[in-house]
Amino acid sequence: MTATLTQFGIDKTNLQNTKLITARLPVLQPGEVLVKIDSFAFTANNITYAELGERLAYWKFYPAAEEGYGVVPAWGFGDVLESRHDDIVAGERIFGFLPMASHAVLQPAKVADSSFVDAAAHRRELPPAYNFYIRTTGDTAFLPELQPFQALFRPLFITSFLIDDFLADEHFFGAQRAILSSASAKTAFGLAHLLHRRGGIEVVGLTSAGNRGFVQDLGSYHQVVLYDEITSLDAGRPTVYVDFAGSGAVRTAIHRHFGDALKYSCAVGLSHREMNPPGKELPGPRPVFFFAPDRIKKRTQDWGRGVIDARFADAMADFLPLARRCLRVIEGRGVTSVSAAWTATLAGQAKADEGLILSLWE
């Protein structure tokens, strides 16, 4: 495997079809580094990347070596095997947006003690937030003993952090209550934790019967409601809806029940795997898609990257004890484990109280 690039390929026309793709590792050019991908977190978010592979250009980050297939990006850790960059040395450990593969070639630029960006030509038009890599030796938020939880939550919790910031910045659009669908999803309960800590707004979690106990045990929701109990909620109380499920039926039920009392409808995820849930034809406000890289860009201009990093590190440190209490880390190595995780998560069979850390290396 050391001389071969191995990719976990996804059929772009049918996400259920996967295959192991192999190719020769490219010869490094000046300024490039070769990274061995040690491990990556795998969540329903990775399925969303594949679902939106064409629409939001996720397939473009790491092109597959075989036509018709895509390589899904994942957040994980890697080690520099070889470097032709003056400021990056072999043996460095990095964290960032890496492919579900054995290796990646990066072209570091804007190198700082704690980070760099990938300046590869094919990535220059892609969202900058996904091209940002952490050098763990210079990162104050990096804790070696918590690597699995950082891989699982750091990329998801930044979205939670940014939505919390956005809603607070907008004074919750005058709402007194926030309803979160797919309340057991990691990004959802990260947001619930932040909103609960912020105070001043009721946090309601929508979930399935099977996940109700897990969501209640989190302690971050003031109320937990099943999807078929939406009409039990007070329809006159000003409400914002943060939709991690992307379910047309659930979104329709929320909009019809609350009508003008729904002050904002924020579309975030697709855990229910509906590509085109209803929008402008619904009662109440039109759903607006939340794209985290746009919010990072705004806050970078407002505050500077250092302030964002410091505030996020504080919020993450406060959140990690909850994550560790509620989640069991499950590690899987080799293509069989990766394939099994992909199939189960695609089928909606992922367990809310488990966090998967995977690797293509046996």
Image (cartoon, helix red, strand yellow):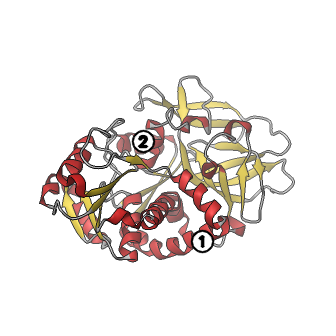
Position in image of residue 43 (x %, y %): 43, 51
Q: How crowded is mark 1: few (under 14 residues within 10 Å), some or many (20 or more)?
A: few
101 is higher (above) or lower (below) than 41: above
Which element type, helix, strand or loop, lies under badge 2? helix
Which residue in the structure is indicated by mark 1?
143
Position in image of residue 252 (x %, y %): 23, 44
* Residue under the point 61% across and 39% down: 61
Q: Quadrant of residue 241?
A: bottom left
* Residue under the point 75% across and 50% down: 81
Q: Residues within 10 Å of mark 2 (few under 14, many from 20)?
A: many
Residue 229 falls left or right of residue 270: left
Q: Quadrant of residue 240?
A: bottom left
Determine if residue 142 is in view.
no
Q: Quadrant of residue 140?
A: bottom right
Residue 304 falls left or right of residue 225: right
Q: Nearer the viewer, residue 56 or 138?
A: 56
Q: Which of marks 1 and 2 is nearer the N terminus?
A: 1
* Residue under the point 62% across and 43% down: 102
Tell which residue pokes out farthest to the left in this image. Answer: 232
Distance between mark 1 and mark 2 Cα atoms: 28 Å
41 is higher (above) or lower (below) than 171: above
Which residue in the structure is indicated by mark 2?
342
Position in image of residue 235 (x %, y %): 17, 59
Position in image of residue 336 (x %, y %): 46, 41
Determine if residue 339 is in view.
yes
Residue 266 falls left or right of residue 11: left
Q: Nearer the viewer, residue 255 or 334?
A: 255
Identify residue type, mark 2.
Trp
120 is higher (above) or lower (below) than 213: above
Q: Nearer the viewer, residue 4 or 40?
A: 40
Identify residue type, mark 1.
Leu
